[in-house]
Image (cartoon, rainbow, N blue to C red):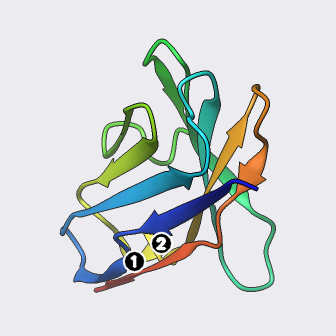
Amino acid sequence: QGQLQESGGGSVQAGGSLRLSCTARGFSTDKCTMDWYRQTPGNQRAWITSIYTDGDATYHDFVKGRFMASRDKTTAYLQMNNLKPGDSAMYFCQSRGCAYNYWGQGTQVTVSS
């Protein structure tokens, strides 16, 4: 049984940066599309970015120019720069498009003004 584990969340001031990691345990993500989502209480998960097996990525408009996705064989990364209070949320990763469709448990990001 594989799983995904997010890490790297925390509390920062507006304008700061964080780098989230999503590590696969028990499988390789090299053939998977890796997605990042975020969720605030009472709201649905919102898609942020997808990074494909060739390394190309697409981004939601609300993070373009501030967030950057990257990956290696077992870990997906989300570099978040110029963070804003509106970025505060629980961040989740997902693997899909391969034999392993998993969600991680999430990591909390809190941005103070």
Mark 2: secondary structure: helix
Tell whether 10 sits left or right of 29.
Answer: left
Tell whether 83 sits left or right of 43.
Answer: left
Residue 100 percent location from the top left of the image:
76, 39
The residue at the point 46 percent across, 40 percent down is 74
**Contact (CB < 8 A) between labels 2 and 1?**
yes
Which residue type carries mark 2?
Gly
Residue 28 percent location from the top left of the image:
56, 35
The answer to whether 31 is drawn above or below residue 18 in the figure is: above
Name the image quarter holding residue 73: top left
Tell whether 68 sits left or right of 108.
Answer: left
Quarter that holds the C terminus:
bottom left
The answer to whether 30 is drawn above or below residue 69 in the figure is: above
Which residue type carries mark 1?
Pro
Quarter that holds the N terminus:
bottom right
Residue highlighted by disc 2: 86
The residue at the point 59 percent across, 37 percent down is 34
Q: Who is closer to the viewer here, 56 or 32?
A: 32
Residue highlighted by disc 1: 85
The answer to whether 107 is drawn above or below residue 92 in the figure is: below
Name the image quarter holding residue 46: bottom right
The residue at the point 47 percent across, 54 percent down is 23
Residue 10 percent location from the top left of the image:
34, 82
Q: Which mark is residue 36?
A: none
Within 10 Å of disc 1 (Cα), the crowding (few <14, some 14-19, many 20+) is some
Within 10 Å of disc 2 (Cα), the crowding (few <14, some 14-19, many 20+) is few
